[in-house]
Image: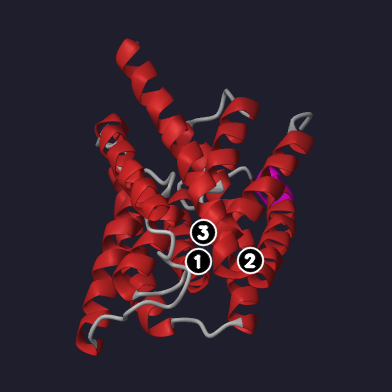
Amino acid sequence: MSELPLLALAALLAGFIDAVAGGGGLVQVPALFNALPMESPATIFGTNKGSSIFGTANATWRYARRIAMPWDIALPAAASAFVFSFIGAVTVAWLPKDVVRPLVLVMMVVVVVYTAVKPDFGKLQGKAPPAEKVRPWALGVGAALGFYDGFFGPGAGSFMIFAFVGMFGLDFLRASSAAKIVNLSTNAAALCFFVPTGHMLWTIALTMAVFNIAGAFVGTRLALRHGSGFVRWVFLAVSIILIGKFGYDTLFSHIQ
């Protein structure tokens, strides 16, 4: 319990980052691992999902009140993401995550470079795909990123935003709002696995949830006030930090 104030501060920052550009797990998951070294990884991830789902729900609600949500894209993606996130959470038990790390690192580098060299990417509404392709593409994106979020997690929100901008022509603000709906679904699916199996520290999760909501409130307000340009810069900053973390972890794991 002596670590709770630090965990609350981490949850506040994570809620802010997640509401704007995804990637709140970069702050919250390491904080939980450092504060609770005796707990199993499954309990850490379950507690993380148990707190972050409240901030994600708050951000989703605030976006839905202020902008036209891309429901035709977000809902099919969320439905398939729910199913595949649960499958991903179950897969954690037998597939080593280290096989995924180098691939994720390469993908994040591509995402950042492409976004950086295309200054207009995601600033304005782009060209949408043909209507008959929207639902199948959304189902495919939801399945792939839902599985990734349930299995591995870090960077899932950033990948979702990039996919919604690149594939569906959304600007960064609307892509971030769509990502919140999908992320809400993947968190719920993961909790369907973690809660019944007892991998949840309720006191810590609910305390962090209060601060996660506060961070999400501030992040959503800033994103709505400053628009897609602000979301784009936060997205790039979070992605670069994510690359640094993955690069360090990958190098360290090979040295070990």
Q: Nearer the viewer, mark 1 or mark 3?
A: 3
Relative image position of residue 143 (x, y in whole percent): 27, 63
Q: Are marks 1 and 3 in contact (CB under 8 Å)?
A: no
Relative image position of residue 206 (x, y in whole percent): 69, 52
> Which span of residues is magenta-colored?
203-207
Instruction: Locate residue 52 relative to residue 178 in the image: left or right.
Output: right
Q: Is residue 40 magenta?
A: no
The number of discs equals 3
The CA span between labels 2 and 1 is 9 Å
Mark 1: which secondary structure? helix
Q: Mark 1, residues whose alpha carbon is within 10 Å: few (<14), some, or many (≥20)?
A: many
Q: Reply above or below: 17 against 164.
A: above
The three-letter amino acid code for the residue at tag 3 is Arg
Which residue is more in the foreground, 249 or 153? 249
Instruction: Locate residue 165 relative to residue 199 in the image: left or right.
Output: left
In the picture of the structure, the residue carrying the numbered disc 1 is: 176
